[in-house]
Amino acid sequence: PDTGASTSFSAGFTAPWGILFDGNNLWVADQGDNMLKKLDSNGAVIQNVQVGAKPAFPVFDGANIWVPNSGDDSLTVVRARDGVVLATLTGNGLGGPLQAAFDGQRVLVTSLTGNSISLWKATDLTPIATFMTGGFSGPLGACSDGINFWITLGQAGRLARL
């Protein structure tokens, strides 16, 4: 039966933001100290990885974790196996990047202040394209259904599909 009880973990976090599971561990983007934190099965931090300013909502592509850094318009790619930073990407329309999504081949990143979305090739971390979503559209959330990317345009009150 549902008792409504939950367990809260606070040790090692200052401002936890995004979270994901890579099949083995949980990873938390912590905006308070600009770290991506690897957790064990008990919720304890076992590794800290320095990323860019104000990490937001990351995604796992099967090998790497893509961390949008909303505070410095960058995207940090971290190898999940050992927490090594592979690259810090800039350009390609990144302006206040917030949410990342993966479709099996590409990573899409929403850019809130840039009113754009950017696509990256997951295998070699290269930029594919930037798409403008319109002034004051506010691209926020993103996901993939395996065929299309779906993006919430919060300020515009609509969805977009790519």
Image: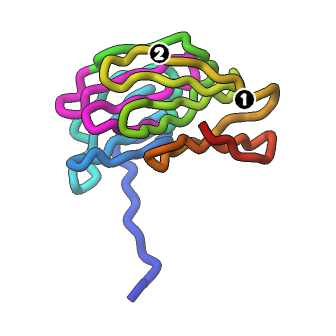
Determine whether, in the image, residue 109 is placed left or right of residue 40: right
Give the Cα distance between marks 1 and 2. 18 Å
Q: Residue at x 47, y 42 (%)?
A: 18
Which image quadrant: the N terminus? bottom left
Res. 33 in view: no
Mark 2, other Cα within 10 Å: few <14 / some 14–19 / many ≥20: some
> In this orientation, which residue lies closer to the viewer: 119 or 94?
119
Res. 42 in view: yes
Above or below 74: residue 144: below
| Rendered location of residue 35, percent (x, y) | 39, 29
Above or below 136: residue 52: above
Q: Which mark is first along the chain, 2 or 1?
A: 2
Q: Is residue 74 magenta?
A: yes
Which residue is the extreme one toward the bottom? 1
Determine whether, in the image, residue 26 is placed left or right of residue 130: left
Residue type, mark 1 in image = Thr
Where is residue 29, by image quadrant?
top left
| Rendered location of residue 118, percent (x, y) | 56, 23
Task: Indicate which disc residue 127 carries.
Answer: 2
| Rendered location of residue 82, percent (x, y) | 18, 29
Q: Secondary structure at mark 1?
A: loop
Q: Is residue 85 magenta?
A: no
Residue placed under numbered mark 1 in the picture: 133
Q: Residue at x 66, y 25 (%)?
A: 116
- Scheme by which the image is coloured: rainbow
Range of magenta residues: 58-84
| Rendered location of residue 8, percent (x, y) | 40, 60
